[in-house]
Image: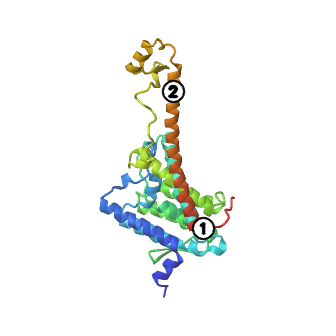
């Protein structure tokens, strides 16, 4: 008789958390009636600046069958968390799950770019990848290299030798589910071999938390930039003042023309009355100084936001790993 599910959850805390997150996201997507095309990763969307989809696509699923199949395989692969004696374990699992999410997404986009630009296969411009299976295939590959004697159990009754599981699952999935992303699954396998063979290594708590911080920042920045979601605190106030003369470039044929807006009439009249209009360098000095002060004020606001981000990241680092020396690799 197997262990109660509660004890297995305690033995696989990271896997259990990921399954919980993916399940919660699936329920949210169903409740809000969000289509997978709105959260999935495609070349067309990436070209438009929707880089945040690299993250949302990994944790979103099309259907309950899609979710159950991926989470069942992930639960079986959670044995990685119990293999600390061979260099794996919970920390390794957390660090490289983060790497696999980003790396598999980047590899998928790279493959689409080659297929579209080099082989002129425009079909892949609109293909949308969605699901955690890229990461699942990555862990399947890592376990096949690190622990080839293991078995992959699916749904409690299907057992595959882990050493052949990555490519068996790749072929099996492509035949049974033609809509499955062959490129996405293959990207996960490539990422898994890169980690298992040590081509990607050196991840520790410091680099994992730093990477997570950058992912969150770039995620929010791309959300704001793409217009998918309005994030107020990322607004940067304009430093231009309509009451002052400004300088801009205008396109003229093949070249560019420098143009300056006219001075306000009241200021012009004042200078003409006093016969000082030709010598207005002092006024421009004031204008430049004023613009620099405005620019400095905006930059100070930006630094204030960044200092808060760094403070929260420092707090999260201490909360997760305690007051321990950082190990730079």
- Quadrant in which the C terminus appears: bottom right
Residue placed most toward the observer, 224 or 167:
224
| Res. 202 mark | none
Measured as percent of width and height from the top left, residue 124 is found at 44, 46
At a point 33% along the width and 55% down the height, the residue shown is 35
At a point 39% along the width and 45% down the height, the residue shown is 227
Q: Is residue 218 above or below residue 147?
A: above
The answer to whether residue 63 is left or right of residue 59 is left
At a point 44% along the width and 37% down the height, the residue shown is 238
Residue with the most extreme bottom position: 1
Measured as percent of width and height from the top left, residue 171 is found at 49, 61
Q: Is residue 160 above or below residue 28?
A: below
Circle 1 residue: 321
Pair 1/2: label in front: 2
Question: Whole-Å distance between the Cαs marked 1 and 2?
Answer: 52 Å
> Mark 1: which secondary structure?
helix
Circle 2 residue: 286
Residue placed most toward the observer, 200 or 299:
299
């Amino acid at each position: 008789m197997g262990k109660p599910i509660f004890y297995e959850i305690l033995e696989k805390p990271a896997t259990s958390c990921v399954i919980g997150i993916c399940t919660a996201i699936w329920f949210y997507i169903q409740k809000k009636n969000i289509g997978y095309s709105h959260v999935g990763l495609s070349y067309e969307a990436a070209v438009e600046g929707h880089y945040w989809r690299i993250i949302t696509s990994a944790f979103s699923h099309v259907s309950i069958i899609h979710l159950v199949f991926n989470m069942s395989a992930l639960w079986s692969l959670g044995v990685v968390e119990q293999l600390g004696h061979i260099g794996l374990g919970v920390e390794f699992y957390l660090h490289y799950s983060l790497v696999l999410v980003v790396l598999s997404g980047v590899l998928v986009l790279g493959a689409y770019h080659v297929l579209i630009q080099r082989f002129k296969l425009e079909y892949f411009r609109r293909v949308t990848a969605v699901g955690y299976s890229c990461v699942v295939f990555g862990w399947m590959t890592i376990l096949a290299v690190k622990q080839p004697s293991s078995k992959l159990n699916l749904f409690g009754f299907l057992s595959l030798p882990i050493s052949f599981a990555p490519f068996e699952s790749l072929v099996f999935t492509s035949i049974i589910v033609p809509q499955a992303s062959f490129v996405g699954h293959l990207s996960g396998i490539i990422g898994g071999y890169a980690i298992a063979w040590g081509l990607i290594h050196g991840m520790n708590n410091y680099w994992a938390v730093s990477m997570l911080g950058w992912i969150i920042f770039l995620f929010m920045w791309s959300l704001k930039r793409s217009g998918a979601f309005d994030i107020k605190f990322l607004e940067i106030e304009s430093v231009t003042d309509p009451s002052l003369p400004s300088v801009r470039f205008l396109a003229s044929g093949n070249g560019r023309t420098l143009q300056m807006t006219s001075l306000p009439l009241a200021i012009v009249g004042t200078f003409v009355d006093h016969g000082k209009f030709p010598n207005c360098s002092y006024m421009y000095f004031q204008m430049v100084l004023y613009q620099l002060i405005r620019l400095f004020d905006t930059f100070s606001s930006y630094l204030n936001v960044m200092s808060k981000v760094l403070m929260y990241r420092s707090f999260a680092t201490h909360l997760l790993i305690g007051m321990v020396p950082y190990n730079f690799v």
